[in-house]
Image (cartoon, helix red, strand yellow):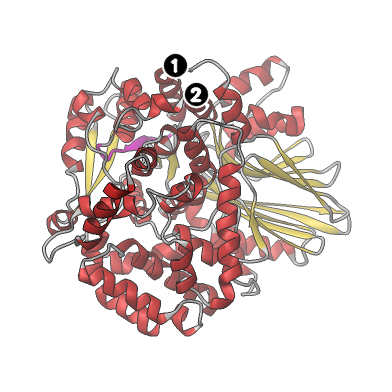
Amino acid sequence: MCGIAGTYLWPDGGPLTDRLTKRLAHRGPDGSGRYARAVADGEVHLGHRRLSILDLSETGAQPMVLDGFALTYNGELYNAPELRAELENAGVRFRGTSDTEVVLQAWRRWGADCLPRLRGMFAFGVFEERTGELTLVRDQLGIKPLFLLRRGRGVVFSSELKALATELGGSLRVDETALVASLLYYWVPDGRCAYREAEKLPPGTWLRCLPDGSVRRGRYYSIRDVAEQAAQGPEADLAEVVAESTRKHLLSDVPVATFLSGGLDSSYLTALAAREQPGISAYTIGFRAEDAKFEAMPDDLRYARQVAARFGVNLHEIEIAPQVLDLLPRMTYHLDEPIGDPAAINTFLICTAARDAGVKVMLSGMGADELFAGYRKHLANVLALRYQRVPHAVRAPVQSIVDRLPVATAKRGLRSVRFAKRFLSFAELPEETAFRRSYTMYDRTELLGLVNPDLASAVDDVLTEHADTYHDTALTDFVNRMCLADSRLFLPGLNLAYTDRSSMAASTEVRVPFVDVDVVRAAFSLPGNRKIVGRQGKVALKDAASSILPSEIVHRPKGLFSAPLRAWMSRDLAPLVREVVDEGVLVKSGLLRREALRRLVAEDASGQQDRSKHLWHILTLEYWYRGATEGASS
């Protein structure tokens, strides 16, 4: 895994590329490289920071140049051995053993037609000296990031947005609609960018820069089309597909470890990985006892220890304590955009501990919940359809009683009440609106009351974008419609984004075997009634995992890869929340309304509503906005 950057027909592009590449040093501390070439009446410059995973020798160094092609590549290609064999049978001779060289030779032989054949996570730029064309590419599912910016005839690109924002001299302007979107979701959707001029190359697409200054775009993969086609075909053998994907994701010339929360997804991958690599290491997190008790969090450590003992895994335990005050601004910087999920801190700390122990590569169970309907929101939305059939005369008193219940006492949170309030907030709404409200932060009225009145049209734009994405499918299966929407919105916009930035901040590569083109196809070959059965979610994956995991792990209550936010907000972060509400730049700039923020604080403090996630995101947005408007720092 690496960091890439470059410029094309950009004035003073060489020095800019050098500065961008330096900004990405944490993504690749093992080496750096540069390539430059004249093109038309300008130049192309490619920069690279290397994290050595495959072929640790100099034959794997980048940018890699061969027969008039130059490649700067960030990623891992899991079917590299198969493609290498095919190319060798066609007469291609390789200098080394890196997957980078496989990508370059595949492009040299097949051009953009090679893209549907690549199985992995990647973002890259490839320059062809004969034509003077630079092509930028992002993987099928949006695992790896690629940001770019166009000015006139010039293009500049980078693995991280912070590099562009910092090195372009503060000339980028904040996109306030993207900030509104982040308030709604607590992250910025992949289709938007926090700065107006910048953009994210969409998953499964390429962008080609031509010497005349024009650009062309193309799509080589559509998860919507794959899902619709898979739904019409035979059901896949899920256990076989997941085992094969995990095996391929272990390809490495350096040690590989796993995340192990003790939940189904990480336990399943860890068990499969341990079968291939006995004695593999795994890393897990815990919280202070008082925080876990206040939050009524499940005892994940007990399950993680059980899995480790059963499969001979070397388990490392990491406690997350209140250094969160120091980590919050640091993580906000590294995340590139305002992302209000504290799981980013968990990922960073686990990856830091792994890196300190000499581990560069980790496997994560990310993506299983989105593809196999494993979140509570999926089951809740199915239950909402049933709830709507209950007579109104019964529903009304239930709503009234739950409204009056507190979500916390002075000593502990009441999770069941929080869930009940959340469920009733969307249970009677239409399908798409209910799905959105089941995982977003505010309804339309609340969001309008929080932001500057001038942003009312931005609120409606963001809500319309969600509806358009949700309805953009021919799938008739309700559960799979939710899974598809999550795979297009939630997965790339939040989970893959924070995983990439948090892990790379610790110079560690995280691989996601569930977020794989073959697993995606298999997931959508299964009907929704195989994923949610009765009051249980993710049933198809549980059935697959039952062949290797004990029943206690497969059917344990779902844990959360999150943090004890209510405990943090009521103790460690309370002074910071007051400071941001009273004197923060969001309030002083007029972007957010002080009285609306004070209501959130009061509701949370009274225990009547759980606003901890809202307030955590306000803190992340505050720190991000300070950096964006006052100048970023490294």
Q: Residues within 10 Å of mark 1 (few under 14, many from 20)?
A: few
Residue 481 magenta? no
Task: Please state which amino acid type lies under the numbered disc 2.
Answer: Ala
Q: Which residues are magenta?
A: 254-262
Is 141 rendered above or below residue 450?
Answer: above
For the residue pair 28 and 570, the one nearer the viewer reads as: 570
Is 319 rendered above or below residue 574?
Answer: above
For the residue pair 523 and 270, the one nearer the viewer reads as: 523
Labels 2 and 1: the sequence-earlier one = 1
Give the residue number, with chain letter if any, for mark 2: 522
Tell me the tag on residue 117: none
- Residue occupying image coordinates x 43% and y 20%: 238
* 139 to the left or right of 415: right
Residue 53 appears at what percent x and percent y?
A: 48, 38
Q: Is residue 108 visible?
A: no
Give the residue number, with chain letter if any, for mark 1: 237
* 38 to the left or right of 284: right
